[in-house]
Image (cartoon, rainbow, N blue to C red):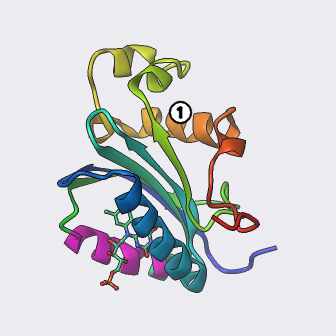
């Protein structure tokens, strides 16, 4: 049971460099250590088709602010667009210092309620708050979840 105030922020961004498996692994390894220390949890989606990111960060407002400042200075991505920031009653990714999934356009087009959006060639930075929530729900409750690394119990 958490007593401090909790928020989540959901943002999208576009990578400015090639993010293959080695780059993503390095990013996630560092992020998970830092997030554990800062009390942050969440998940990161990356599309290999257009290189855009979608990230959910959960934690105390000050910890989120601190990381957002770093993220906005990080030259490995650009067009950082905050889609949602609001208080939450509990974490959706309590056991994840940073979950991760690489998603194909086919997978995105199969998400109920987002088929038209992604079929039209839109990317994460085009999402509005409502669509961002749909994607969050699809990820947190959907069949993708158990397959991905980043759970605190996972050694990855
Ligand atoms: C798409 C993306 C997601 C990131 N996610 C995190 C994260 O969850 N936690 C984190 O500490 N750093 C994350 N980073 C790295 C930060 O931008 C930054 O490099 C890191 O916090 C180290 O900052 P520092 O060198 O100023 O200490 C991410 C970077 C990118 C490009």
Question: What residue sits 64% from the left and 36% below the top?
Answer: 144
Magenta segment, principal secondary structure? helix
Find ligand 1 in the image and state its quadrant. bottom left
Q: Is the residue 153 above or below the residue 133 in the image?
A: below
Q: Is residue 122 visible?
A: yes
Relative depth, front residue between 30 and 81: 30
- The structure residue drawn at horizontal position 47% and vertical position 66%, both measured from the top left corner, is 28
The answer to which quarter of the image holds residue 48 is top left
The local crowd at label 1, few if under 14, some if 14 to 19, many if 20 or more residues have their Cα within 10 Å, is: some
On whether residue 73 falls in the magenta region, the answer is: yes
* Residue at 75%, 75% in the rendered image: 2
Name the residue nearer the viewer: 11 or 36. Answer: 36
Q: Which residue is mark 1?
A: 134
Q: Residue 59 placed where, x, y %?
A: 57, 72
Residue 116 image position (x, y, % from top left): 39, 13
Residue 141 on the magenta span = no
* Left or right placement of residue 135 versus residue 144 in this view: left
* Residue 143 position within the rendered picture, expressed as x and y whole percent measured from the top left: 69, 32
Residue 114 visible, this angle = no
Left or right, residue 138 beside residue 104: right
Q: Is residue 75 above or below residue 49?
A: below
What segment is highlighted magenta in the picture? Answer: 63-74
Q: Secondary structure at mark 1?
A: helix
Could you tell me which residue is drawn at 50 percent across and 71 percent down? 29
Quarter of the image with the C terminus in it:
bottom right
């Amino acid at each position: 049971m958490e007593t401090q105030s909790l928020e989540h922020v959901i943002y999208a961004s576009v990578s400015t460099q090639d993010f293959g498996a080695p780059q993503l692994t390095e990013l996630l390894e560092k992020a998970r250590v830092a997030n554990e220390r800062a009390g942050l949890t969440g998940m990161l989606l990356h599309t290999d088709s257009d290189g855009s990111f979608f990230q959910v960060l959960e934690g105390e407002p000050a910890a989120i602010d601190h990381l957002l400042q770093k993220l906005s200075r990080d030259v490995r991505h650009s067009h950082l667009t905050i889609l949602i920031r609001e208080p939450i009653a509990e974490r959706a990714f309590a056991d994840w210092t940073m979950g991760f999934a690489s998603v194909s356009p086919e997978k995105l087009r199969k998400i109920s309620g987002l088929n038209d959006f992604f079929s039209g060639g839109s990317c994460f930075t085009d999402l509005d708050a409502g669509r961002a929530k749909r994607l969050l729900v699809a990820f947190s409750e959907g069949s993708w979840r158990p397959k991905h690394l980043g759970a605190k119990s996972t050694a990855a």
